């Protein structure tokens, strides 16, 4: 984070202090994770009162955007409005991307010290059920490998792209789960996996090759690297049944897609 970013955050905090509806300003995103560039924007969250959040949610006004708070070329502040209940929900049952959004977060300004504790708790890895999640991720990866083969048989570029992306996603999610590292969503996925301390040899290179080539050979290379790396938890009914439950029948119980867990 550079000085012009710090200056923008200070202006943002001062502006928030003049708003009775704002309880806290939390800086997050690439700057707090060490990924920021000189021209990176300032990301974060504005924690508002319950009443203000309810009004904003009803009106679809859930984002904050300002170029006036930044004095560098291309700079802007981009944030989401949330309330305390949102933070509590992330702590209790938030998806990994929802939790990852708070990794490294900085409290720029607050009227309530307990909000800082919630932000910290929100960024913790959900260890409960991790073995079951890994079994489900492996089933998704194995199903995606099969679909890559089907795409090659049919010379179907759409299916090949979809299946290769799915295999890359769930192969990476397995490695992150093995390391108990939060899945950061797609933008930072490969970088996060590359920083994971324990992963198969040349794993990131294999995933990159899969994303480019989209071939059965590239898909097999990724899956073999995973299977040789360690013994993974397995879905009791096999990968095809688990895939069906998670991707075709998940609507029956209203569960979110396996991608978002």
Image (cartoon, rainbow, N blue to C red):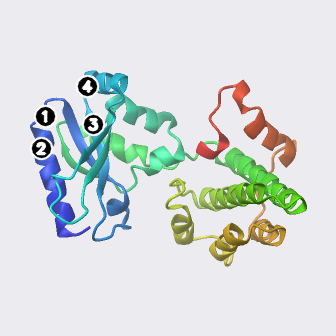
Q: Is residue 86 above or below residue 4?
A: above
- The answer to which of 217 and 67 lies nearer the viewer is 67
* Quadrant, the N terminus: bottom left
Distance between mark 3 and mark 1 Cα atoms: 11 Å
Mark 3 vs mark 4: give the one in front.
4
For residue 54, which quarter of the picture? top left
On the image, numbered disc 3 is attached to which residue? 47
On the image, numbered disc 2 is attached to which residue? 15
SS class of the residue under badge 1? Answer: loop
* Residue 109 marker: none
Relative image position of residue 177 (x, y in whole percent): 62, 56
15 horizontally vs 108: left or right: left
Circles 1 and 2: CB distance less than 8 Å? yes
Using a 10 Å C-alpha cutoff, classify the residue at mark 1 as few (fewer than 14 neighbours), some (14 to 19) or many (20 or more).
Answer: few
On the image, numbered disc 4 is attached to which residue? 52
Relative image position of residue 257 (x, y in whole percent): 65, 39
* Residue 19 marker: 1
Circles 3 and 4: CB distance less than 8 Å? no
Using a 10 Å C-alpha cutoff, classify the residue at mark 4 as few (fewer than 14 neighbours), some (14 to 19) or many (20 or more).
Answer: some
Task: Pick whichever of labels 2 and 4 is earlier in the sequence.
Answer: 2
Write the residue at 18% across / 65% down: 72
188 horizontally vs 53: left or right: right
Using a 10 Å C-alpha cutoff, classify the residue at mark 3 as few (fewer than 14 neighbours), some (14 to 19) or many (20 or more).
Answer: many
158 horizontally vs 8: left or right: right
Distance between mark 2 and mark 3 Cα atoms: 14 Å
Distance between mark 2 and mark 4 Cα atoms: 17 Å
Can you see residue 50? yes
SS class of the residue under badge 3? Answer: strand
Task: Pick whichever of labels 1 and 4 is earlier in the sequence.
Answer: 1
Task: Pick whichever of labels 2 and 3 is earlier in the sequence.
Answer: 2
């Amino acid at each position: 984070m550079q000085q012009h970013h710090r200056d923008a955050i200070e202006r943002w905090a001062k502006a928030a202090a003049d708003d009775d509806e704002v309880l806290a300003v939390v800086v997050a995103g690439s700057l707090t994770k060490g990924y920021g560039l000189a021209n990176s924007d300032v990301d974060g969250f504005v924690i508002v009162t319950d009443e203000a959040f309810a009004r904003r949610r009803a009106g679809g006004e859930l984002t904050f955007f300002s170029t006036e708070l930044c004095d560098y070329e291309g700079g802007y502040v981009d944030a989401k409005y949330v309330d305390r209940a949102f933070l509590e929900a992330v702590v209790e049952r938030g998806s990994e991307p929802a939790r990852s959004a708070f990794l490294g977060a900085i409290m720029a300004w607050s009227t309530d010290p307990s909000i800082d504790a919630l932000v910290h708790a929100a960024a913790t890895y959900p260890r409960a059920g991790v073995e079951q999640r890994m079994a489900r991720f492996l089933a998704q990866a194995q199903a995606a490998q099969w679909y890559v083969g089907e795409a090659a048989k049919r010379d179907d570029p759409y299916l090949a792209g979809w299946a290769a992306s799915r295999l890359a996603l769930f192969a990476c999610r397995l490695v992150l789960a093995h390391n108990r590292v939060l899945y950061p969503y797609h933008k930072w996925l490969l970088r996060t996996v590359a920083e994971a301390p324990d992963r198969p040899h040349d794993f990131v290179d294999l995933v990159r090759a899969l994303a480019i080539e989209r071939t059965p050979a590239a898909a097999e290379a990724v899956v073999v690297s995973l299977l040789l790396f360690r013994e993974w938890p397995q879905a009791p009914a096999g990968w095809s049944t688990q895939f069906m439950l998670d991707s075709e029948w998940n609507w029956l119980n209203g569960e979110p897609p396996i991608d978002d867990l």
